[in-house]
Image (tube, grey):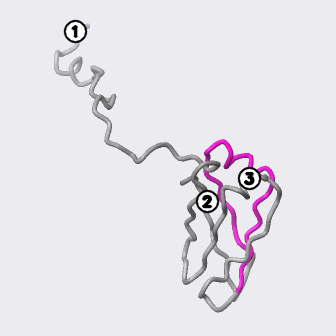
Amino acid sequence: MAVPAYALLSCSSSSDDSNSNPQPTGGNPDCLAKGTKSNIEGNHGHNITVSSADVSAGDEKTYNITGSSGHSHNVTVSSANFTTLKSNQQIFITSTSGDSHTHNVTISCA
């Protein structure tokens, strides 16, 4: 069975998939050295700060994320979550309910 040449060309692989000229990213994320950054989904004034000292200690901790929102939510970061952050991987946590809603919180390494 003969295969048309264009069929062979459309399935060929390319070495262009590798990034031979990567753009600078500002360094690698490092929770222990640089602390964390966070994103609160549907945010309207809430704030959470997880310090590098908290990550290093690794003990479960509950953060109040009220900020300027006028109502309270808590986010509990477990010891297992801190172990994940120590490995420079992000974590996802859902806040407690406040004012009839919750927030999904992402904490990643700065």
| 85 magenta-colored | yes
Please identify the quarter of the rendering in which residue 39 is found.
bottom right
Q: Which amino acid, mark 1? A: Ala
Identify which residue is drawn at 39% across, 46% down.
25
Position of residue 22 measured from the top left corner of the image (x, y, whole percent): 32, 36
Query: Nearest the camera: 33 or 87?
Result: 33
Identify the magenta region.
72-95
User: Which numbered mark, 3 or 1, is in the foreground of this view?
Assistant: 3
- Identify the residue under disc 2: 107
Identify which residue is drawn at 71% across, 85% down.
72
- Identify the residue under disc 1: 2
Q: Quadrant of the N terminus?
A: top left
Q: Which amino acid, mark 2? A: Ile
Height in image: 44 above or below 20?
below
Q: Is there CB contact under 8 Å for labels 3 and 1?
A: no
Height in image: 97 above or below 7?
below
